[in-house]
Amino acid sequence: MNPGTCATTDHWEHVQAISREALGEPLWRFIEECRAAEHPESHLISVLHKVQSQYGHLSPTHLDAVAQLLGVPAAKVAGVASFYHFFRLAPRGKFIINVCMGTACYVKGADRVAMRLMDELGIAWGETSKDGVFTVEQARCLGTCGLAPVLMIDNEMHGQVTPDQVPAILEKYLKKARAQAPA
Amino acid sequence: MRKKKINLTIDGNAVTVPEGTTIMEACEGLGINIPRLCYHPDLSLMGSCRVCIVEVKGMGFYMTSCSQKVWEGMEVQTNSPDIRQARRDIVELLLDNHPKDCQTCERDGHCELQNLAYAMGVRARHFEGKRKRFPIDLSSHSVVRDSEKCVLCGRCVRVCAEIQGVHNLSQHGRGFNTVVAPAHMANMDESVCIQCGQCINVCPTAAFVEKRSAGGVWDAIADPEMHVVVQTAPSIRAAIGEGFGLPLGTPAVGKMVTALRRLGFDAVFDTDFGADMTIVEEAHEFLTRLKEGPLPMITSCSPGWISFLEKFYPELIPHASTCRSPMSMVSVLTKTYYAQKKGIDPRKIYMVAVMPCVAKKYEARRPEHYLDLPSPASGEGQGVRVPLTDAVLTTRELIWMIKCYGIDFLKLPDGDFDAPLGLASGAGDIFGTTGGVMEATLRAASELVTGKPADRLEFTEVRAVEGLRETYVAIGEHNIRVGVANGLTNAKILLDKVKAGEPFHVIEVMACPGGCIGGGGQPYPQEGYHVLDPELLRKRASALYSIDAGKKLRKSYENPAVEEVYEAFLGSPGSPKAHELLHTHYTPKFPRGIR
Amino acid sequence: MSNKVSQQFNALLAKAEQSLRARATPRAIRVQVGSATCEQAAGADEVLAEFRNHVAASGRTDIQLHRTGCTGRCSREPIVGVMVPGQIPIKYERVDRKAVHEIFTQHILGGQPVLGRILDGPAENLVAQEILVCGSLRCGWREGKSFVAVLKEKLASAGIGPDQVRVTVGSCFGACSMEDAVHRSHLLIRPAKVLYRVADEADLDEILRDHILGGQVVERLQVPGKTIGRKFLELYGDVAFFNRQTRIALRHNGVLDPESIEEYFHYRGFEALAKVLGKGNPKWVIDEITRSKLRGRGGGGFPTGEKWAMAAKAAEKTRYLICNADEGDPGAFMDRSMLESDPLNVIEGMIIGAYAIGAARGFVYIRAEYPMAIRRLENAIAQCRQWGLLGKDILGSGFDFDLEIRLGAGAFVCGEETALIHSIEGERGQPRIRPPYPTESGLWGKPTVINNVETFANVPAVINYGSDWFSRIGTATSGGTKVFALAGKIRHTGLVEVPMGTTLRQVVYDIGGGVAEGKQLKAVQTGGPAGGCIPAKWIDTPIDFDTLTKAGSIMGSGGMIILDEDDCMVDIAKFYLTFSQDESCGKCTPCREGSVRMLEILERITTGQGSLEDLDWLKRLALLMKKTSLCGLGRAAPNPVLSTLEHFRDEYVAHVVDKRCPAHKCTALIHYEIDPAKCVGCTLCARNCPVPCIAGQRRQPHEIDQLKCVKCGKCFEVCRFDAVQRL
């Protein structure tokens, strides 16, 4: 006596379409694979890594899309994203300058290098320069203590950095940014 | 299987308990109640507040008694100078990151943090420093979130996820800046929150409290132009006594009515009357469903449940009964039938509903529950849109109003509800407890379907406070498959069965554990009970069942007041006018909940 | 079963050797460049590219470029090794493009090593031969006299001077693992690369006569086979920083190409795995590891064999193995180095562990901040799968096991076992109450063993060289070695692997070269933010789990920071607590709130607003955190504070009573003054002052306006006349 459920009020396809569009095809396909795997919710962090590496940060739209497609409550996705320092919830500059503030770097004067950076760019920790090129962030030990103090920019390591070397380093990446900018 | 027995010593006393007992439970057997904060017997273990710590010989650090199971030969110290100092310091650390506004706080006098601070002997502040700052979230009609008062016990997160299956809340950030909030720290209003208010019930402080509506009610009562009407849900009469020292589960209908009159209400109606109306309309709807579908029909009086339906199972919306809730039925009849009957301008009627529920505050503002009043015949003024229910008060708010006035509740004589919307059958009374709506429906359906009076009034197979029940009830030649769920995690189980095609006929869903008697607006539990405590819920439920059993009028169909409304005003159940006034519709809502 | 496994293994080994032979040019000159993150940061990629250009331009076909991992000699990177057949390998330090040119033309083409650029040089001359003697305590010969003394005497009386044959004392070759070493000494002759065992003077005479003078190998005394330390010492044995270490976990670092599975096979790779699978007895593996006295290298020091045994006997049959590569301790980079330089070793250790506990699935949880390590690991896993060493029916044994990498995302607390598990499960990385312990109920509720990278790196060595040998290296309670990341105010920063029981003095002075810039040692900090500061007076403390705990610190994962007279101990404690507070997950009250309150007190102390009473409150909070926190992070976070309060209380007292920072570090408590006697009036300081607040005429002594000075220290940095004093 049950004619079954009437799908007239269901908007899942609409929600799914929006979510897919927000993330783009390679990403939503990856999420599908995760869903098909064992313990799909455990792939949340890998998914967030991929989203961030594509879009530079994790916006609420992205997080909601991940929640819907992976089948994890949005509050949990947001709670996980906000827990880990690696994940950025706000847009960042083109180049993230990670200043290692681990012990070895600290005793070798990393704080002075950091101050010079922030002076040159006119920003504080976690902020992005006005031209959108640089964000300065504190990194916990990067594991290259023998070369303290260390900066990591765009996956490149710069060791034994002195405050006076800062302008030249910035210039190098500014050039790179200009070269990469759309014409 | 018999469990092994473990012998241990607690504070020098020898104790024997079954294997698997925690230190806290073992202590309770000895009459020692270890202080605690994040622990709740019905929620998963966190072990994070560290208040319940005890010293165990041989361990270099203190252990949490809520989680640690006893072992053979364990030696426990629950109260030594070191432990007392440690507990005291931990509670002070919580206070140091908490506003210092006890005297102006909602929960002054019944706050768990205050109680702990007193019991642990925090008489000075040694470690004060910076405090976390968050804006207060007043966006929701029902629930106010003040994260500065949060002690991060995690009860709200757990109840929302584990008991309600909504998972609206999560801790965000980490360390000192951790905050409990909906996704993206959005406002409650924009989140997947269904306003059930269980977070309010479990919160030990005022981090979650209900939105206050008492101010508007006082103003309306004081306004000589306004005709202020009040209706009370069944659950109020079962719990209001708790606010005045009556034993748990003492029904207090008569005193409640008198108190309301003293407060200044012009008319006191009974939501139970609305429940009887709902039964009549819904039973009629059910007959149609039996012939044309869709089945199962799912009850719709619980606005938290409706919110859940619209966000989490929107495809099942066609299954919900289109009947309004008893509250909205009484409200609409007040502003139409009653207004007409008494010649009162409906725009001058201020309808107040006292509910055990905070989601009702949200229901009262849903656009579907507004009334378009035409311009008066005199031609002055324009058509106006008024809410059916102007204000919703929780049981807690009513208790406060009575105390604020200074009324000595216990000395009041009994009073009666007012006509024409004050007479209710026992079936209406049991609406407040889980299974009650189902039972009331079955009493009526029996008669309606078979044409003969039901051979029994009580359907005890649907009574119980446990979350989920399924059974078959024979009505005529039909074998009606019935499902009853309270708490939405339980509801999900039934709903998934429905989606899988299992042939239910009628399902009752109440969002709150135990039903409305466990609602988000009910009084905080007394000493010795905790929120969600089945004992507490059973006692409140028994109050309602006893009212029902004590009435002569026990069937909705036999309620003369109901008959009169139809005869004089609506016509018949399911008539166009009944449809216009007593029915509504639901729509899918965003954000879409994730199941 | 055993036959099938060894057959398959031998087939793979043959395939690998053949592949290597096909690629190798006989008698080629080999140029070796490191390629781990440190090397990259120092510019090794450019160096390698430059060499490539030179080789191409020269047209020579007998020069081979070889990429290796990192030796751990970080402060001198990029290090380039030049191996000319028949000569002792030469290592160059701090090589840049200019140096490449010199080395190539002068040494490789011209045959003359560039003495001025040699690692830990400059060298005055080079010897033709070197005798490396095992200096470990286990090596001893029958004679009563010192082996080295007798050797030197004999060389002298044979007329062989130290400029022809150099004698160097190094550490264990591992030859003792292959025989009863009680009455033997071992020596390695370079560049011949022959390892001898010497029981008495007669043996020594024979070697001197036949080999040193006669150029013939003495077959009967030769130790065949690849002993553990041998290859490393063959390459680096002349460098004191290296030859005083005992390389077990790091045995292949700087020796093989981390991206070549063939080279790994060549250096006894997967031999241990084949042995384990061939025996077909998981319990034997657990017993071996237990007998070896290997204890967890991540900091917990829990006996590894015991942990495996607990998981193996669980009722639940689905089990998981996890490698903790989160390495969050600031100042620690051992795990990174191992994963970038020898990932297959770690994987082999994991497969053996998985077999022992009956796990079919394993995970490497690695922090996202290690991109190269992740790449190397992904590459290594892919290669293992291709070669049938991961996946189904490994080496025909019927054992299935595969590995997945799971990335961390910047949370130090995820190094804690239960937090790590939650992170893999896709949750916030917060620990949970224990018990139940992971070996009972871990990942997804199943029995789980979590071990550190270094622990796994030791496993194949234990299996190959024996638990007996491993347990004899180290102390009575703790077998094997520990890798330390030596950093801070030390002359030689880098990775140091020494047997348990080695003293701090030996590490800091013998290997580390002592305190940099000739300053005074103040303290040795071990264990990262969970450890304490060991005062200099306890420099002779032997390094072991229990001894370090007794000294008020912990072993930790291996970070060892050297602090000198310019380090303020209160500031160091504040630094570590700041880290711990920032990384606190926030779940439990004492750590979340207590760490902030402790920091506020330390802030007051270091800005001159503290009182003596504050020291008591600080201690009270520290003990509260220690006794009531939910996890190890909270329990250990107060350690730096507690140990500095204990051993350096005078510094704290100076801060709160005298409002003075004895080390002149805490900015609020120092001020800068210009000594008029030394100031020549060059105006350099005034021109560099950001405020500006230095007044003075040319050629006249300058003065700092103390009211305006922001204490940036710029004047102190730029003054060339030492006229600016920091007081």
Image (cartoon, coloured by chain):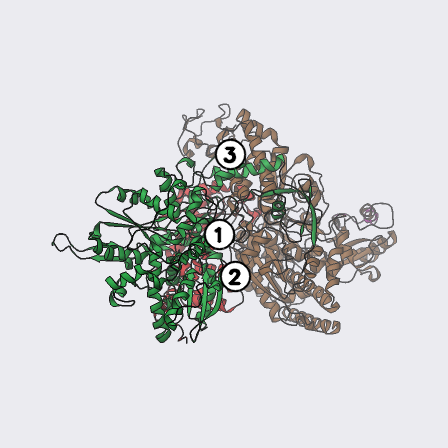
Chain colours: A red, B green, C brown
Indicate the amino acid at tag 3.
Phe
Real-space Cα separation, disc 1 to disc 2, in angstroms: 42 Å
Indicate the amino acid at tag 1.
Lys
Dot 1 and dot 2 within a common chain: no
Q: Is residue B1 above or below residue B117?
A: below
Disc assigned to residue B127 = 3
Chain where mark 1 sits: B
Q: Position of residue C518 (x, y in %)?
A: 62, 36
Q: Position of residue A90 (x, y in %)?
A: 40, 52
Q: Residues within 10 Å of mark 3 (few under 14, many from 20)?
A: many
Q: Is residue B526 magenta?
A: no
Real-space Cα separation, disc 3 to disc 2, in angstroms: 39 Å
Q: Residue at 11% x, 54% y: name it.
A: B379
For the residue labelled by badge 3, is the local secondary structure a helix, a strand or a loop?
loop
For the residue labelled by badge 1, is the local secondary structure a helix, a strand or a loop?
helix
Chain where mark 3 sits: B
- Whether tag 3 and tag 1 are in contact, CB under 8 A, the answer is no
Dot 3 and dot 2 within a common chain: no
Of callouts 3 and 1, which one flags the residue occurring earlier in the amino acid sequence?
3
Q: Is residue C108 above or below residue C698?
A: below
Q: Please state if B541 lies on the left or on the right of C657 as rendered.
A: left
Residue pointed to by mark 2: A42
Q: Is residue C154 magenta?
A: yes
- The quadrant the C terminus of chain B occupies is bottom left
Q: Please state if B302 lies on the left or on the right of C37 as rendered.
A: left
State the residue in front, C667 or C145: C667
Q: Residues within 10 Å of mark 2 (few under 14, many from 20)?
A: many
State the residue in front, B396 or A133: B396
Magenta segment? C153-165
Residue pointed to by mark 1: B539
Q: How many marks?
A: 3
